[in-house]
Amino acid sequence: MTTNCGTTFRSIVLFSVTIITALSCSKKINTLSESDPWKRIELTIKNIPQTKFQDKIYNINDFGAIADGKTLNTSAFEKAIKACAENGGGKVLVPNGKYLTGAIHLESNVNLHLDDNAEILFSLNPKDYPIVHTSWEGTEVMNYSPLIYAKNKTNVAVTGKGILNGQADSTNWWIWSGGKNYGWKKGIPSQNDPANRDVLVEMAEKGIPVSERVFGDGRYLRPNFIEFFECNTVLVKDITVINSPFWILHPIKTNNIIIDGVTVNSHGPNNDGCDPEYSQNVIIKNCTFNTGDDCIAIKSGRDAEGRRVAIPSKNIIVQNCKMIDGHGGVVIGSEVSAGVNNVFVENCKMDSPNLDRAIRIKTNSKRGGVIENVFVRNLEVGTVKECVLLVTMFYNVYGAQTGNFIPTVRNISLENITVKNGGKYSVWAEGYKESPVENITLKNVKIEKVDSVYLLKNIKNIHFVNTYINGEKADQNIK
């Protein structure tokens, strides 16, 4: 009895020491991160698990695929992926050639790999995309399957230097947007019809279960291109994605994802390049975005839906990327009701007369949310149309967007930035009197040409340190 009590006592002491040590280490890491927030990048990268696959190849041609660009190969993809998963995983190979298919649903431990001259053409028939649990503009819904979809999977990838072609244009998917620039004319049904998008938003506001939010045929809500839903340990590498119906890369409720060397070239409506939503530990690196909407848009749910889910997007790292056309280079919002924090952007190039802003944060009093700790450094900006940094709490789309959920936006840093043509403003920031935008710092920033230095409304603490705008030093603090 004495021995057991002594052992128990020693175990308790050891456990206590372990907990104290862990707390001490955690405190040290947090202190490091606070003194130098960029240290958090090293910690995040170190802790993200890497995908690993068995050295087995499942060639889709062996499962009946035909590379003529006309034969529907949905069944061949399904069989190859199933065989791969049932045998412990590996590589599902898409050899050189053009393969038409409907939705591709991935499984755990499967790497969908495209040869260099392989192209997957996705069907334009909505019936080739079964109804699944997905999301549309920050609201969960039963809708058309994304073109490539994984739900509740672990260790999954899409790789290779081939092309994923959604085939969308103004004669098919894009016309559903209701945009006149995309082929829509009065009398053509679209997402804007009363029974479609607005009904979905109302259902979410009322808390109607997702299983009862059944859309699809006749509702005209376009599918996402590549969606990882509630997945873990994901890799998307080297592929080129073109002509998407809607959002392009959409990790939702997904942790530990690396997007590396991807090229996105798609100028349709709502063609965001990458939209991490409710996701954590995300690395987007070495990518090129040339889009019809935001190049990268970090999100966390729309309005009541986001507040119910309550999973912030955090630890988002963007490195060595190139942004061409788009509404913004790196954007946070507008669906950010669960909040976004710890965003790091470094060593990127942004340049196009059709790129509206470099860094953009957008929310409103319907969205709410806490957006904080956004760090940007070593940015090379050629031309942007509107401004270098835009922060607004009054973002309106589809009409007035006001409510009782005043956002919080704070701690934004831009360092070592060069800009040739900044458009209308170097900084355009506007908050509420009761919730001002807090703590903006521009350090070692050089903007050669811009119409106005800034447009500010309800801002608390903006600092210009060793910053030159239109050839003049702008060192000053505005409290």
Image (cartoon, helix red, strand yellow):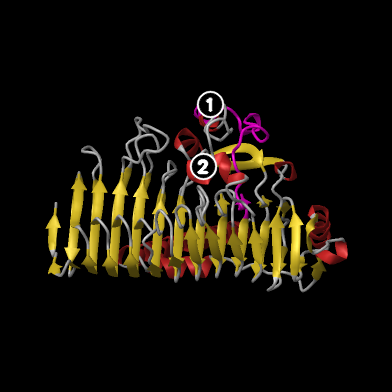
**Res. 404 mark:** none
Q: Mark 1 highlights which residue?
A: 194
Mark 2: secondary structure: loop
Q: Residue at x 82, y 60 (%)?
A: 80
Horizontal placement of 290 versus 235: left or right?
left
Mark 1: secondary structure: loop
Residues at discs 2 and 1 in contact (Cβ within 8 Å): no
Q: Which residues are magenta?
A: 202-231
Magenta segment: does it hold 225? yes
Q: Residue at x 51, y 39 (%)?
A: 309
Q: Quarter of the image holding residue 208? A: top right
Which residue occupies the foreground of this view, 392 or 406?
A: 392
Q: Is residue 408 above or below residue 462?
A: above
Q: Which three-letter amino acid code belongs to the residue tagged 1?
A: Pro
Question: Mark 2 or 1, which is nearer the eye?
Answer: 1
Magenta segment: does it hold 125? no
Q: In the rendering, at what x and y percent does residue 195 appear?
A: 57, 26
Q: Residue at x 61, y 46 (%)?
A: 171
Q: Earlier in the sequence, mark 2 or mark 1?
A: 2
Which residue occupies the foreground of this view, 143 or 25?
A: 143
Q: In the rendering, at what x and y percent does residue 175 appear?
A: 57, 42
Residue 92 visible within the image = no
Q: In the rendering, at what x and y percent does residue 67 appear?
A: 80, 64
Q: Main secondary structure of the magenta part?
A: loop
Q: Is residue 242 above or below residue 175?
A: below
Q: Which three-letter amino acid code belongs to the residue tagged 2?
A: Glu
**Res. 137 mark:** 2
Q: Is residue 65 above or below residue 320?
A: above
